[in-house]
Amino acid sequence: MSYRLGDPIQSAIRCPKLDCQRLLINGQACGCTWREEPDPDPLVGRLVALTDPDTVGVLAAGKVTGMDRADDGMTLTIAQYDAD
């Protein structure tokens, strides 16, 4: 659907998907709405502990907040817990 300059607009919002952000006029969906959101990685939300292999002591502990997998490995983003 298209609109001419001067046509009435009841609402104009941005697409909520971060990779799109197109302007949606009068509630008309954009082309990205058919795409499913990817499932979060199963490691996101898990608790992790980083240990010293020599002493087997815990160096840090936290929760996985992000995960990026690649062919040669993976990168974790971790929210570290304070050692109170």
Image: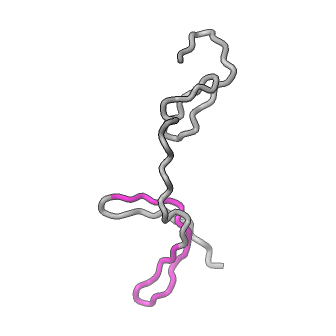
Specify the principal SS of the magenta part: strand
In the picture shown, does residue 39 fall above or below 77? above
Front position in the image: 54 or 73: 73
Question: Among all residues in the image, which is located at the extreme bottom?
Answer: 55
Front position in the image: 4 or 78: 4
Q: Position of residue 26 (x, y in %)?
A: 64, 23
In the picture shown, does residue 23 fall above or below 54? above
Residue lying at 46% horizontally and 60% vertically, measured from the top left: 67
In the picture shown, does residue 19 fall above or below 77? above
- Magenta span of residues: 48-70
Q: How was the colour assigned to the protein in this rendering?
A: one colour
Question: Among all residues in the image, which is located at the extreme right?
Answer: 10
If the image is split into quadrants, where does the C terminus sit?
bottom right
Residue lying at 59% horizontally and 32% vertically, measured from the top left: 14
Front position in the image: 3 or 81: 3
Residue lying at 56% horizontally and 29% vertically, measured from the top left: 29
Q: Position of residue 10 (x, y in %)?
A: 69, 20
Residue lying at 48% horizontally and 77% vertically, measured from the top left: 50
Q: Position of residue 83 (x, y in %)?
A: 62, 78
Q: On the image, which quarter does residue 13 sit in?
A: top right
How many numbered marks, from 0 up? 0
Magenta span has 59? yes
Magenta span has 73? no
Q: Position of residue 5 (x, y in %)?
A: 58, 10
Is 74 placed left or right of 48 in the picture?
left
